[in-house]
Image (cartoon, grey):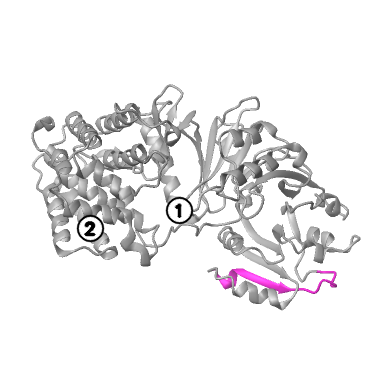
């Protein structure tokens, strides 16, 4: 039971906000397997971190010793044996490097200082040290900066020609988060229609202005940000997906050579995936989505999603309107890649507020109930084994958080109640993260469930339902406001309100359809939030653990265990009557 959860180390601060890997442009490269990278000038700290994750060596060409001190003061943690800074005077004609050893050259703002005219300048030296099939990447985007064709400069030297790809990038400065081939107007328009454009400012008038400048062709010469990728090759792959991605799909019988595409690398957590949206040539909507991990530390999550989706479809649970289908998977470099079908629809949280009948909420609860019913397993674990697994989680919890003695005893009693269950304990296939942010509303009005990376084939009953209901109640109640989520939880679960009635109704319906004894509702409720608090710990620095939402939700629920809303929820008579 809970194989994924029990094999995970919930270490505080390992996935905190804004501590995200950089250099998203790396996913545009032909290959993610890099031995040596050469940086012309000092890269940004987040870029350096990403380069050290994906390559064996990073060589940094510096113009003076001051840049070496800047490198040491970046605050980034990397293996010093993996990074080789070289100070080279701009007047020197030759880099102190052997020929043909570099897979990737990153050209930064130092280019103009290094470049000299003629075949003996920096362009010739770059071509000399670059491997056959190696790549060069650079960006442009400052106001009125001319758009040079560095391919011409490099092709002025003897050797193989360079193919050139140019990308439209957003935002206008900072870490790239969106990339589309420069001339693909249809895909750029899709990015704006679906609010996938990444602006610099949170202020809406500035967002609209930036979007206008970045979108319209007439402003491209002066305002658009662009990236250029030169590949040491005779073949022209302009506009096509990166070869490593096309190869992964072709191994599963899918030819993506003629697909349009967009890269999305948004999000403020390193666990957030980089996405490729894939469009058929004349289609307005993407047919496939490809997910890639940013950091090898999170490979297991995407691998788990691939296994979970494959298993669900093998079990016959798959429904094209509810569930994406995993089409192909691969391991480019030391990362993980998974290609899936796209479910067409609108994000759940962009829908209008639900009515008092809760049609979207009921549909989501009904599907989670159906998922539990169709995957019910009463043979894989007995109550004592389930309680033993929960005690392991409880031990991790107490190593991470502090509880009052009476709160700790209360949780121990909940786990004991599960262990003393006389009937066989029912395990279910668990989504693991069914918050409203992971849901879509399809064109037929059904609720679809995305992002299965936290799935548990032998998971706990009711945990998915409780987690969704908490998220749903906050979505319904907030209505775009910034009301405190813990206060909304208390109103929805602890007080006798219309939402509490809905929560109780959905819970008891779930138990009835799965044959789950009502006296298990209470211990499953509390152990659910214990588990969520553990998962949240990875997103919190140790100094802020006491501020964790799920920790305080759990404490409040224990301290008010006799609240009227909980008495209604935990009622033990059959069918909740």
82 in the magenta segment: yes
User: Which of 547 and 340 lies nearest the eye of the viewer?
Assistant: 547
**Up-down: is 376 above or below 560?**
above
Crowding near pointer 1: few (<14 within 10 Å), some, many (20+)? some
**Up-down: is 268 above or below 474?**
below
- The residue that appears at 37% across and 41% down in the rendered structure is 478
Question: What residue would you read off at disc 1?
Answer: 298
Tell me: 103 left or right of 396.
right
Element carrying mark 1: helix
**How many labels, in total?**
2
Which image quadrant for residue 479?
A: top left
**Up-down: is 542 above or below 550?**
below
Which image quadrant for residue 537?
A: bottom left
Question: What residue would you read off at disc 2?
Answer: 394
Q: Does the rendering let one see residue 118? A: yes
Residue 170, given in percent of the width and then of the height, sits at: 64, 46
């Amino acid at each position: 039971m809970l194989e994924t959860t029990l094999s995970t180390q919930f270490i505080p601060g390992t996935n905190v906000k804004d501590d995200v890997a950089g250099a998203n442009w790396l996913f545009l490269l032909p290959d993610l397997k890099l031995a040596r990278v050469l940086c012309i000038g000092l890269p940004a700290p987040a870029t350096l971190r990403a380069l050290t994750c994906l390559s064996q060596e990073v060589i940094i060409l510096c113009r003076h010793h001051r840049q070496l001190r800047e490198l040491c003061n970046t605050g980034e943690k990397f293996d010093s044996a993996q990074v080789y800074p070289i100070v080279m005077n701009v007047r020197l004609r030759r880099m102190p490097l052997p020929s043909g050893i570099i897979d990737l050259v990153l050209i930064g703002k130092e280019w103009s200082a290094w470049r000299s005219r003629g075949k003996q300048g920096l362009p010739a030296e770059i071509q000399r040290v670059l491997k056959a099939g190696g790549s060069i990447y650079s960006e442009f985007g400052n106001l009125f900066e001319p758009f040079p064709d560095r391919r011409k400069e490099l092709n002025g030297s003897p050797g193989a020609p360079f193919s050139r790809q140019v990308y439209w990038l957003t935002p206008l400065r900072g870490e790239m988060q969106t990339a589309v081939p420069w001339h693909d107007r249809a895909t750029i328009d899709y990015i704006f229609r679906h609010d996938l454009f990444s602006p610099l400012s949170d202020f809406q008038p500035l967002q609209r202005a930036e979007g206008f400048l970045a979108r319209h062709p007439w402003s491209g010469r002066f305002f658009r940000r662009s990236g250029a990728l030169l590949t040491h090759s005779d073949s022209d792959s302009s506009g096509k997906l990166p070869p490593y991605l096309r190869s992964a799909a072709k191994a599963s019988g899918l030819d993506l050579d003629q697909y349009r595409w967009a890269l999305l690398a948004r999000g403020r957590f390193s666990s957030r995936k980089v996405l490729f949206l894939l469009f058929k040539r004349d289609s307005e909507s993407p047919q496939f989505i490809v997910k890639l991990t940013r950091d090898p530390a999170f490979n297991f999550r995407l691998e788990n999603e691939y296994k979970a989706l494959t298993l669900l479809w093998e079990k016959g649970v798959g429904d094209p309107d509810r569930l994406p289908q995993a089409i192909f998977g691969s391991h480019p470099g030391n990362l993980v890649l998974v290609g899936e079908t796209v479910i067409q629809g609108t994000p759940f949280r962009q829908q209008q507020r639900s009515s008092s009948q809760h049609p979207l909420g009921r549909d989501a609860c009904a599907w989670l109930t159906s998922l539990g019913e169709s995957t019910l397993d009463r043979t894989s674990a007995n109550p004592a084994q389930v309680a033993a697994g929960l005690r392991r989680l409880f031990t991790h919890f107490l190593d991470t958080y502090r509880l009052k003695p009476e709160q700790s005893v209360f949780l121990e009693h909940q786990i004991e109640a599960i262990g003393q269950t006389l009937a066989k304990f029912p395990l279910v296939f668990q989504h693991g993260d069914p918050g409203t942010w992971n849901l879509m509303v399809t064109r037929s009005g059904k609720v679809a469930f995305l992002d299965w990376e936290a799935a548990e084939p032998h998971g706990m009953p009711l945990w998915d339902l409780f987690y969704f209901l908490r998220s749903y109640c906050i979505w319904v109640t907030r209505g775009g406001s910034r009301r405190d989520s813990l206060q909304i939880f208390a109103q929805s679960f602890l007080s006798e309100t219309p939402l509490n009635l809905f929560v109780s109704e959905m819970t008891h319906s779930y138990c009835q359809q799965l044959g789950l004894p009502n006296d298990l509702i209470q211990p499953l409720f509390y152990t659910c939030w214990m588990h969520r608090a553990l998962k949240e710990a990875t997103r919190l620095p140790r100094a802020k653990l006491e501020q964790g939402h799920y920790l305080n939700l759990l404490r409040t629920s224990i301290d008010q265990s006799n609240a009227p809303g909980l008495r209604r929820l935990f009622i033990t008579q059959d069918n909740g009557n």
